[in-house]
Amino acid sequence: MHEMLPRPLSIGAITALLFASACATPAIAPTAPPAGTSAANSGSTPAAAAGGPTSVAAGAAPANAGAGCPNGLRKLSISTATTPPNVALTAPFVARGLGYFGKHCIDADIVEFEGGLSATSRTAVAQGSVMGGVSVTDVGQGVKVHEVWVMAPHLPQSYEVGPDVKAAADLKGKKLSAAGGGVGSFNWVMGREVLKTANLTVDDVQFIPSATAGRLPGLVAGQVDAVALHPEDVYLAEKQKPGVHTLVVLKELLPNYVYNAYGVADSWAAKDPDLIRDAVAALMEANRAIYQNKDAVVPIMMDATQKDRPEVEFAWDWLTRNCVFAVNTGYLPEATAWSAQLAVDNGDVPAAQKPTPEQVFDQKISNDALALVGGPTTVRNCKD
């Protein structure tokens, strides 16, 4: 589910997908405070560990959800890119838990995928069965999908490394995480970008695949030497293993990289644009609430992420200070254009098929949703 540069699909996979679908301030590296009181409780369900989607109940809808809907609630499946989800990915849980989906007459089923770049996730979106991650690479590879809302226009992760890695050049010969899908996964893509800064390639290191839930314990146990971690896991990693530190804040390395964009199959958008618009409106309201109502959203985030309060509050603080959550459409045409060029430069999309921002993002649906929530706003200096 990230605006992300997944591994190019094979011709057969592309054919299958096509058939199925017929903030201005510098980021500050999250640094964990001294050892405190919490311990992470991270894990995945058997279904998620096997790569399939898992439906979750965290952030359950209020009992009176849909009370003002004379025609009842409309069903919608919406995905998250990791299992359990990270704090940066909890907008759907907040939208459901605080009643925003119900306000817009939607009964949302949230499903967790093992990696936003996984074939399972991408196929589900292309088939029109779920609202989930869409990227410029999907569009460039000919999949009939569009982004409809950028939930997180900026990268929330830091690239965390073990004690003996002082610079990117030290990664040569090391074990890097490829959690959430192996080659082509988000962690693999971020590792590739970090390696470039030292004129290294993916052939200079060993990538270790794992479940997304294995990112933190893999670093702490020394199974990998480097991994892209969300703020809550940065907090835990630096507390649990002395010497673990941030090599680079990914938002600073890749300021135009759009982290997380929701999208749908073109066929679904054409069939029921009002449902998609209303879902986006609910998500926009949820993101605004994340900035404005910490006391209400943190318990929902704890439930969804299976993390304790100290690390969740640490992540909430970092993410809101760095404007990771969009408060409007989140759409930045220049960032989409940059991402498309990066996909071409990396060989993920042929140059002749590089999509334009307009081919990637459905501005009408997103702008119509924005109008439903009162138009553009600025929250805590965040404007995207």
Image (spheres, rainbow, N blue to C red):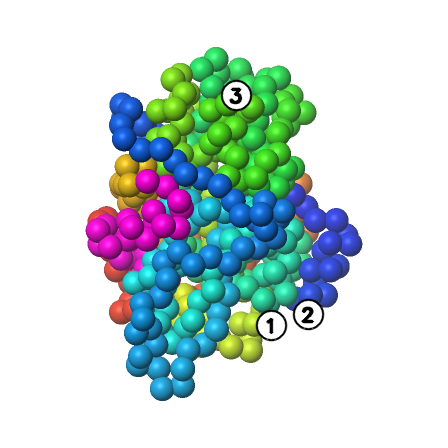
Badge 1 marks a residue whose secondary structure is helix
In this rendering, does residue 379 appear at all?
no
Q: Which residue is mark 2?
A: 22
Badge 2 marks a residue whose secondary structure is loop
Is 108 displayed left or right of 38 in the figure?
right
User: Which numbered disc flags the more N-terminal residue, 1 or 2?
Assistant: 2
Mark pair 3, 2: CA separation: 45 Å
Residue 322, disc? none
Mark pair 1, 2: CA separation: 7 Å
Specify few, some or many for label 2: CA neighbours under 10 Å numbering under 14, 14-19, or 20 or more. Answer: some
- The magenta region covers 283-308
Residue drawn 70% across the image and 49% down it: 9
User: Which numbered disc flags the more N-terminal residue, 1 or 3?
Assistant: 3
In this rendering, does residue 178 appear at all?
yes
Identity of the amino acid at label 3?
Answer: Gly
Is 173 displayed left or right of 324 in the figure?
right
Badge 3 marks a residue whose secondary structure is loop
Q: Is residue 93 magenta?
A: no
Specify few, some or many for label 1: CA neighbours under 10 Å numbering under 14, 14-19, or 20 or more. Answer: some
Residue 267, disc? 1
Against 83, residue 99 (above or below) is below
Identity of the amino acid at label 2?
Answer: Ala
Q: Which residue is mark 3?
A: 222
Contact? badges 1 and 2 (CB < 8 Å): yes
Residue drawn 34% across the image and 47% down it: 302
Q: Nearer the viewer, mark 3 or mark 2?
A: 3
Residue drawn 44% across the image and 67% down it: 108
Q: Is residue 297 magenta?
A: yes
